[in-house]
Structure formats: structure tokens, C-alpha cells
């Protein structure tokens, strides 16, 4: 019983550390103070290092969690018949943008892990992209999103928009505006004659 309680407490501590780190990295970049993250969680720095021996390990855990959350969110939206395909896609892209705030200044080692097809981080990222692609294809099949855009381009545009806002102070109103402009650039816009100008070069 004591062992089970200890494992549960450790899991909760890990989750609180990840939540605090996610907020800190979103606000201050990936060089945010680890001691401050520990203080936010009300634990000592030694406890943080027991869960995450390096800054890179903490970043990998955050990214992995973000990717899993986005994958699960996409699956929920796909299974929700009351949500229109375009609405589901835009909802998911907003969630992607919120998570992407923590990606500013990722160290080289993390980028290498993302590119390594044998890494767990690469696998969780690929699963996230695949779920996003299902949302995109459904919206395209419904005639609500332009057919010439790929999931890679869609994700890159959203993450690039988040990066641009962060360089300008990351103000929430500017973030919402830029994401709205970027996301609705995917939408098909019929012409008055009934054609579609979105798929044209």
C-alpha cells in the first residue's frame, strides 16, 4: 500500500513539474530557470532532477506529452459528430498553437531526437501529425478546406505564426488575430460564380 501511494505521489509530482515547466518555457523560452520551476511546484531542485536529470529530458517529456495530448484531442474531435469538419480542424489548430508556445529555442539535441526515426519523440510527433492529417483530409473531403495544403504545411504555418508573435512580446490579442488569419487561409472561398479561388496559384 505504501509503495502504491509513493508511486502515485511521484506521478503527481511529475505532472505538476511538467505543468510548471510548460508555463515557464512558454513565458521565458527553453532557458527558463529550473529552480523557478521547482519553486512553482513547491519541491526542491533535487526532486526535479530525480524526475528529469537534464533540461533536455524535461523538454523531451513536455514535447512528448504535448504530442500525445494533440493526438488524443484529434481523435476526440474525429469521433464527435456534432462538430463540423472545419470547426474540428480549427479547434485542433488552436490547441496546437497553445502547445507550440513551449517550442521557442529548442536545443539542438531535441531537434536531433525529433529527426531520429528510432526515437520515441519522433514516433509521438509522427502520430500527432497523422491524427492532424485525418482532421485535415476530412475537412478537405467536405469541401471546407483548400485541397492543395498538406498537414506539414498547415502545422508549419501555425508554429511559425506562434514564433512570430513571441518575437513581438507574445501578446494574447495579437496571437489570436494572427492565428485566425493563418488558420482561415486554409479555408476554401467560393467565388461569386461558384468557383473556388483558394486552390488556384
Image (tube, rainbow, N blue to C red):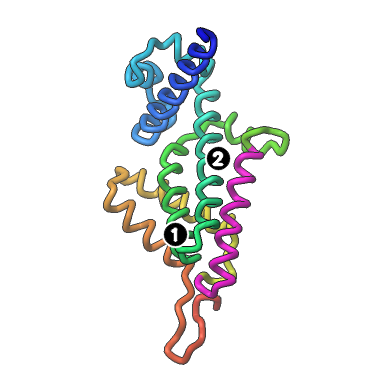
Q: Nearer the viewer, residue 69 or 194?
A: 69
Residue 159: % across, % down: 47, 49
Q: Residue at x 38, y 17 (%)?
A: 38
Q: Which mark is residue 68?
A: 2
Mark 2: which secondary structure?
Answer: helix
Q: Which residue lies at the image location 41% right of the left edge and 41% below the top edge?
A: 101
- State the extent of the magenta-drawn residues as a range: 122-144
Count of numbered circles on the image = 2
Residue 166 in the image: above or below residue 19: below
Q: Position of residue 55 (x, y in %)?
A: 50, 22
Give the dominant element type of the magenta stretch: helix, strand or loop. Answer: helix
159 w.r.t. 200: above or below: above
Query: Label 1's element?
Result: helix
In this orientation, which residue lies closer to the viewer: 88 or 28? 88
> In the image, is residue 200 part of the stretch drawn in magenta?
no
Residue with the most extreme bottom position: 193
In this rendering, the answer to whether 117 lies above or below 154 is above
Q: Is residue 197 left or right of residue 122?
A: left
Q: Which residue is mark 1?
A: 90
Looking at the image, is mark 1 or mark 2 earlier in the sequence? 2
Q: Disc 1 and disc 2: Cα gap in Å?
A: 18 Å
Quarter in which the C terminus is drawn: bottom right
Amino acid at each position: 500500500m505504501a509503495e502504491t501511494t509513493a508511486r502515485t505521489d511521484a506521478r503527481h509530482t511529475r505532472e505538476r513539474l511538467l505543468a510548471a515547466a510548460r508555463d515557464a518555457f512558454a513565458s521565458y523560452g527553453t532557458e527558463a530557470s529550473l529552480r523557478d520551476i521547482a519553486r512553482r511546484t513547491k519541491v526542491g531542485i533535487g526532486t526535479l532532477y530525480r524526475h528529469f536529470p537534464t533540461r533536455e529530458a524535461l523538454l523531451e517529456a513536455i514535447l512528448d506529452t504535448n504530442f500525445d495530448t494533440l493526438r488524443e484531442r484529434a481523435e476526440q474531435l474525429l469521433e464527435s459528430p456534432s462538430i463540423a469538419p472545419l470547426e474540428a480542424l480549427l479547434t485542433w489548430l488552436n490547441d496546437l498553437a497553445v502547445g507550440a508556445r513551449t517550442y521557442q529555442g529548442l536545443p539542438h539535441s531535441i531537434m536531433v531526437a525529433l529527426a531520429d526515426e528510432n526515437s520515441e519523440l519522433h514516433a509521438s510527433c509522427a502520430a500527432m501529425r497523422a491524427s492532424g492529417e485525418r482532421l485535415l483530409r476530412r475537412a478537405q473531403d467536405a469541401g471546407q478546406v483548400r485541397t492543395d495544403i498538406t498537414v506539414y504545411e498547415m502545422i508549419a504555418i501555425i508554429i511559425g505564426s506562434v514564433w512570430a508573435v513571441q518575437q513581438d512580446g507574445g501578446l494574447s490579442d495579437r496571437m489570436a488575430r494572427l492565428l485566425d488569419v493563418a488558420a482561415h487561409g486554409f479555408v476554401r472561398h467560393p467565388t461569386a460564380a461558384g468557383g473556388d479561388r483558394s486552390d488556384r496559384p
